[in-house]
Image: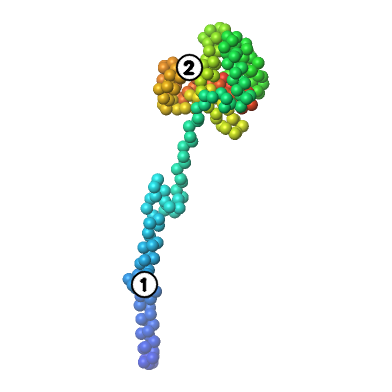
Amino acid sequence: MGAKPGIWGWIGLVLALSVLLAPDPMHGLDAWAQENPAPGAEDDKAEENGPGNDHEPQPGGEQAGDEQDGDTVAKPQKPAPPAEIIRDLEQLPFPARRMHELLVEAAKSGDIEKLRPFIGTGEDATMLSLGGLDGDPIDFLKSQSGDPEGHEILAILLEVLEAGYVHLDVGTENDIFVWPYFFAVPLEALTPQQKVELFTILTSGDLEEMKTFGAYVFFRVGITPQGRWRFFVAGD
């Protein structure tokens, strides 16, 4: 049999076992600290969770700092303002105003051939069809008219040019003045007075059909600030 351990051996053995079996001393300190907060700690915690730091939704469903649960909350974008309806032709730059005058004169003349000088050719030609155009442009315009001489299409052109207009894509390469302004105004937003104006161009039946598209799709005219007659088209 081996020798029995001395008194110091027993003491060492007991100390070792007590260390192994005792709870984590740091865990005990943490629990004690939570139950016995330091002076002023509660005030600091209240300040941390006070107004502006309580993670309650801010007006509009946004969180302060634009964050919620660690994810960035996108700020709602303001809708684009409606296009301004303009009636004063003096607000047009001179080249655009002059082209408008020339087209009105040609329409009032009753001679559709007087439009030819303003249509142009090649890449600068006026767009008369959304699907492209082959052949003579004046013949095409006559084909769009209810009469062989093209008087009806001239009347439509005149009515469109006598309406108010809008200025779209301002300052870009697509900068354009467009007649009539109905092209850029939601149909459901038209006032009674504006509907009367619209019915000088189309019928009530036409309007009901356009509502299925959600937009004005009858003839419209585009003139650039530089005075180019860019389009005279209908369709969606």
Q: Please indicate whether residue 139 sits to the left or right of residue 19 in the image.
A: right
- Residue drawn 59% across the image and 10% down it: 109
Residue 21 place in picture, x, y as percent? 35, 77
Q: Indicate whether 133 appears above or below 44.
A: above
Amino acid type indicated by mark 1: Pro
Query: Which quadrant would residue 158 be assigned to in this image?
Result: top right
Residue 76 place in picture, x, y as percent? 45, 43
Return the residue found at the far left. 35
Disc 2 designates what residue?
Answer: 201
Amino acid type indicated by mark 2: Ile
Disc 1 designates what residue?
Answer: 39
- Residue drawn 52% across the image and 15% down it: 156
- Which numbered dot is residue 8? none
Residue 192 in sight from this viewpoint: yes
Q: Residues within 10 Å of mark 1 (few under 14, many from 20)?
A: few
Q: For the image shown, how many numbered marks are present on the structure? A: 2
Query: Which quadrant would residue 114 be assigned to in this image?
Result: top right
- Residue drawn 35% across the image and 77% down it: 22
Q: Residues within 10 Å of mark 2 (few under 14, many from 20)?
A: some
Q: Earlier in the sequence, mark 1 or mark 2?
A: 1
Q: Secondary structure at mark 2?
A: loop
Q: CA distance from mark 1 to mark 2?
A: 81 Å
Q: Nearer the viewer, residue 182 or 212?
A: 182
- Residue drawn 38% across the image and 60% down it: 49
Q: Secondary structure at mark 1?
A: loop
- Name the image colouring: rainbow
Q: Nearer the viewer, residue 219 or 16?
A: 219
Residue 155 place in picture, x, y as percent? 53, 13
Residue 165 place in picture, x, y as percent? 52, 24
Q: Nearer the viewer, residue 154 or 121?
A: 154
Rendered-image quadrant of the N terminus: bottom left
